[in-house]
Amino acid sequence: MTPLNPRLLDTGSPPIPEIQAWGARYAGRGGLLNMCQAVPSHAPAPGMLERLARAAGDPASATYGPILGEAALREAYAADLGALYGGRIDAAEVAITAGCNQAYFVAMMALAQRGDAVLLPTPWYFNHRMTLDMLGVEPRPLPCRAEAGFVPDPEAAAALIDARVRAIVLVTPNNPTGAIYPPEVIARFHALCRERGIWLVLDETYRDFLPPGHDRPHGLLSGETWPENLVQLHSFSKSFAIPGHRLGALGAPAALFPELGKVMDCVQICAGRPAQAALAWGLGALADWRAANRAEMQARAAAVRAAFDRLPGWELQSLGAYFAYVRHPFGDTSAWRVAERLAAGHGLLCLPGPAFAGEEAHLRIAFANVAEAGIASMEARLRAASA
C-alpha cells in the first residue's frame, strides 16, 4: 500500500470496537450487557426532542453557523458556568465544539507542537493519549495510585515538568477511574501551572453527576475574570443524553479564541446547528430534569457498590460519576484476557485497565449505561465468571 502518515500508524486504536467484536461471539442467555462505552441509558427530555426536531426542519439550520458557536448557546453556557462556580463568565470566554473530544483536540493543537510534552495522569483516557500521539506530542504519564484514591499528586507532577512540558491535563470526575479530585488539589495544580508558565487543561465532562456535597467542583472560576492559564472542557452528551449530536464546550481566556478558531474552522467549521438551538433552551429549562438524572446516577452508583460488596474476590477500588474501577480476582491473568472472557463467555462488555495505561489487574465498568436490573445482571455474570 502507498505509505501513510507514520505517526498515525504508530497511534494505537480505540479499544471499544475490539471489545464489541468479542461480545459478538456471545451465544448465552440474556443478551449482551454493554458496560463498555459511557452512553446514557435514558432518552433526551421530551422538550429537547421536540426542539431538536423543529430546529432540524428549519432550513436556516442547514447553513454554516459561527465557528465558535451560536451566540445564544454561548451566552446560555456562560450563564450556566457562572451560576455553578459563582464567577463572572463572559460569552467571549466560551466556545461550542463538536463534542468534548473536539474541544480537547483543538486545545492540544493550540497549546503544544511536535516535540513538546503534556502531562496526563494515568490511568488516562485513551483518546487523550491518541490525540497527542498523532500530533507528535509526548504524553508524559503522571501515575495515580489506588492507595491515593487515584487522585494525582501535584508534587509528583512538579518533578516531571521540564522545558518541553506545555500543559497538565486533569479529568475530574475521572475517566476511567471515576475519582473525584478535591478542590484543593485542583487549586494546587493550577498554582503549579501558573508558577511554571504552562497551561492547566481541566476536562469536566462528568461534572453534572457529582455526588451530594460536591456542588462546586473547584474555585478556579469564582473570580471576576477567566484565569489566564486555564482551559476548561465539557460535554453535553451525558448531561442531556445527546451523544449522537456531538456537542461540547471549551472555556479559556478570550484572547486565545482567535487561535482556537483557526483549528475549529479546519476540523468542522461549526458544531451542529439544530442541537445548538435546542441546547440553548435546555440549559435554562431542564435544571430539574438534569437534577433527577444526577440523583439516578447516584442511586446506580450505590447499587454498584452494594453489588461488589457481595462479590467475593472482586475489589471496587474507585467509584464516581459514570464509572466503577475494579480489581479482578484472577491473579496475574491479563485484564485483556479477563475482558475477553467476560464478553465472549458471559455477555458482559467492559474495558481492561491497560486500555488506559492502567494496571493489568483492573477493569473499567460504565454503570451509567444500565438501569437497576442491568446492575443486578452484572453482578450475576461476574459471579458466574469467577465461580
Image (cartoon, rainbow, N blue to C red):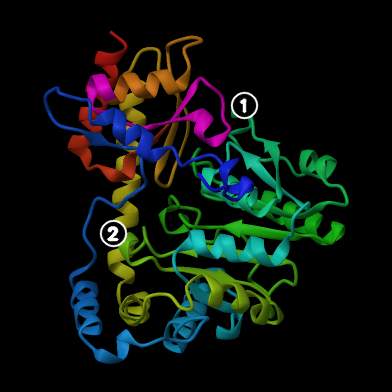
x, y percentage for residue 274? 31, 80
Between 83 and 166, the one lying in front of the other is 166
- Amino acid on which the number 1 mark rests in the picture: Glu
In this rendering, is residue 154 above or below 167?
above
In this rendering, is residue 157 above or below 283?
above
In the image, farthest residue toward the left? 29
In this rendering, is residue 43 above or below 371?
below
Indicate the quadrant where residue 284 lies.
bottom left
Label placed on residue 147: 1
Can residue 219 be seen in the rendering of this structure?
no
Alpha-carbon distance for marks 2 and 1? 32 Å
- Amino acid on which the number 2 mark rests in the picture: Ala
In this picture, residue 28 sits left or right of residue 328 = left
Magenta segment includes 90: no
Between 372 and 129, the one lying in front of the other is 129
First in residue order: circle 2 vs circle 1? 1
x, y percentage for residue 129? 60, 45
Between 347 and 374, the one lying in front of the other is 347
Q: Which residue is mark 2?
A: 292
Q: Provide the secondary structure element on which disc 2 rests.
A: helix
In this picture, residue 159 sits left or right of residue 231 = right
Bounds of the magenta segment: 344-363
In this rendering, is residue 152 above or below 293?
above
Between 268 and 31, the one lying in front of the other is 268
Can residue 233 be seen in the rendering of this structure?
yes
